[in-house]
Amino acid sequence: MTTTTLKIADLQSRVEAIFRKAGLNSVQFEALARVIVAGERDACKSHGIYRIEGALRTVKAGKVKPDAVPVLDLNEGSAIVKVNADGGFANPAFELGLPALAERARKLGIAALVINDCTHFSALWPEVEGVTGKGLAGLVMCPSYATVAPTGGKTPLLGTNPFAFGWPRVDASPYVFDFATSVAARGEIELHRRAGKPLPEGWAIDAQGNPTTDPEAALAGAMLPFGGHKGAAIGTMIELLAGIMIGDLTSPEVLDYLGTTTLAPFHGELIIAMSPQAFAQGRAGDPFARAEVLFDAIVGSGARLPSQRRFAARAKSEADGITLTAAEMEHLDRLLDK
Ligand code: NDP
Ligand code: PYC
């Protein structure tokens, strides 16, 4: 197979050029390109360059504002910092709110960043790593559009609602997990469809509620929550906390608003930052040192930590560059010519 290896900065420039040409302002296209390139760098294909087309479609459909400028509301004295994304993408809104979130969490022990009125199509680990990069533990969550049937039901009501957690480590990459609360991200179903590959069993039901491994039937039917009723309950919690509680759309409301799942979803996002030192104050033991004992035991047992695969891919990309197939390179050229 013919491949091309690009430096990370070169891929960043190419992706920025595509979004610039589509009319996005620099606030939007720089942050957007950073998160997409990070997906490729970390070998997270379901949220890499494959997402560019959907973002462009959403711009073209008038469902995301290409020249949006997010607005920070410091909400002085409160543990809740807010950013209104101004109808643009979530990524620049997060970058704007992160310093205030970190400052507030250090001061109060815990703080939240609420992002409203944003289009969100990306993985959550770049955001949770933003929080751990400030020496804080973080939880990030958002709804999506209704594509997941709660366990026992046949109707898609919940989103694939991603959920991420991060814990900072002194001499190592942070402990981070980040997953859809469905069995897999919807992006994975789409990638199976494009590759003409059947889905693993247990991922989806068809429009009649029967189990299916056909990606087309799954896209027309419903995806299933991970871990049965447990995943459905966590997905519902995300609708409550990162939809209703922050005064933004739930996944069924997002689907009503967009009328399709072919555009990137418009909703809100909740980020919670916590200072482990503040929580552990007055108790014996340094929380970071104690966490290392736990991580050592997990790895010592033969398991791996979540994100280890991703961090290994990142180290390789940083050393050698990002390798794309000929088809992926042609796809990027086509998007620039559009
Ligand atoms: P995966 O099932 O691929 O991975 C979930 C997490 O589990 C990762 O942190 C992964 O680490 C870790 N992991 C995987 N295998 C193991 C293992 N054997 N031992 C320990 N840890 C492991 O994720 P999903 O398909 O559920 O989601 C993919 C992405 O899609 C996420 O980044 C999510 O944010 C995004 N998404 C975004 C949505 C949105 O609306 N914006 C909606 C839904 C999903 P590693 O990466 O190192 O393998
Ligand atoms: O992969 O499920 C997904 C997804 C939905 C919105 C963005 N990513």
Image (cartoon, rainbow, N blue to C red):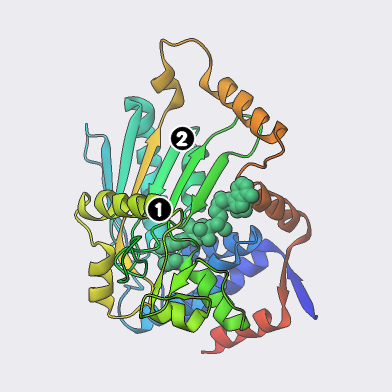
Establish if 22 lies above or below 7: below
Q: x, y percentage for residue 59?
A: 37, 79
Q: Which mark is residue 208?
A: none
Res 203 seen here: yes
Of callouts 1 and 2, the N-terminal one: 2
Query: Dot 1 lies on which element?
Result: helix
Q: Position of residue 306 (x, y in %)?
A: 60, 45
Residue under the point 63% across and 41% down: 305
Residue sitting at x 47%, y 43%: 165
Residue 108 pos. (x, y %) = 32, 26
Q: In the picture, residue 175 is in which quadrant?
A: top right
**Residue 56 visible within the image:** no
Q: Is residue 198 left or right of residue 127?
A: right
Residue 231's tag is: 1
- Residue drawn where x is 67% and y is 40% of the image: 303
Task: Identify the residue shown where x is 27% and y is 80%.
Answer: 259
Against 91, residue 209 (above or below) is: below
Q: Residues within 10 Å of mark 2 (few under 14, many from 20)?
A: many
Q: Quadrant of ligand 2?
A: bottom left
Q: Which structural element holds mark 2?
A: strand
Q: Nearer the viewer, residue 68 or 268?
A: 268
Q: CA distance from mark 1 to mark 2?
A: 22 Å
Residue type at tag 2: Ala
> What is the quadrant of the N terminus in the image?
bottom right
Indicate the position of residue 217 as horizontal and vertical percent values.
45, 82
Q: Tag 1: residue type?
A: Gly
- The residue that disc 2 covers is 137
